[in-house]
Amino acid sequence: MDAAHDATNQKNNPLWIYSLKQYGDPSCATFLLDAQDTYQLDINILLFIGWLATQKRCLDIQKLSASNINTWQEQVIQPLRKVRLQAKTMANNDFYQSIKKLELSAEHQEQNKLYGISHNMKKQNFEFSECIRRGCEVYFEELGRKLEKRWLQILTQHLQPK
């Protein structure tokens, strides 16, 4: 088994490590949560675009679409998030924390799946910001959304490794 494949089954695959570091910045977390809530964007995909850019790779939307990652997001993560948000006001804290932990585990599984397809994304001769721009363009196009230049600039700043 090669190291890249083995890393998809570990809690410390490079995408997960990058994501924890970037998301650990409160301003980045706030920005990404706003993107999720306002534009229905997948935070894991945005972090994946950022991590790919650190590897001089751009998101290949066909490879992403061919995976079951969108299905996982829609059928597992989003329902868990909905239950967690409902439980926040209706249930005791222990139950809420259990659902939150389960949602985080599902997010981690999505990141493992993303890392697993990352080797299919071709190396490019682009700078970090260009990889982010190209990845976001195809992602937003796939979602039928308009990519705003200022929003992209802010995202790029948040995804830049610390």
Image (cartoon, rainbow, N blue to C red):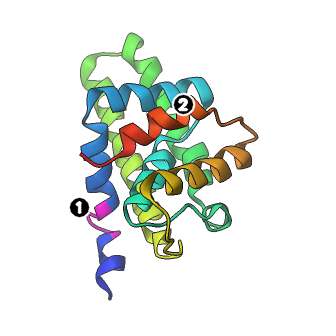
Of the 4 image quadrants, the one containing the C terminus is top left
Depicted 89 relative to depicted 56: above or below: above
User: Within 10 Å of the Cα at label 2, are there few (<14), some (14-19), or many (20+) other Cα atoms?
Assistant: few
For mark 2, what is the residue?
151
Percent coordinates x, y for residue 33 in the rendering: 44, 28
Residue 100: tell me if it is visible.
Answer: yes
Where disc 2 sits, the SS reads helix
The residue shown at (57%, 54%) is 135
The residue shown at (41%, 48%) is 106
Where disc 1 sits, the SS reads loop
Q: Which mark is residue 12?
A: 1
Marked residue nearer the N-terminal end (2 or 1): 1
Furthest-bottom residue in this view: 1
Percent coordinates x, y for residue 140 in the rendering: 67, 44
Of the 4 image quadrants, the one containing the N terminus is bottom left
Picture quadrant where residue 152 is located: top right
| Observer-nearest of 34 and 95 | 34
Depicted 69 relative to depicted 62: above or below: above
Magenta residue check for 9: yes
Picture quadrant where residue 116 is located: bottom left
Question: Identity of the amino acid at label 2?
Answer: Trp
The residue shown at (41%, 56%) is 111
Magenta residue check for 78: no
**What is the spatial separation of the Cα atoms under label 2 and label 1, in whole angstroms?**
30 Å
Percent coordinates x, y for residue 108 in the rendering: 36, 52
Furthest-right residue in this view: 144
| Observer-nearest of 86 and 160 | 160
Depicted 42 relative to depicted 130: above or below: above
The residue shown at (31%, 55%) is 16
Question: Identity of the amino acid at label 1?
Answer: Asn
Q: Which residues are magenta?
A: 8-14
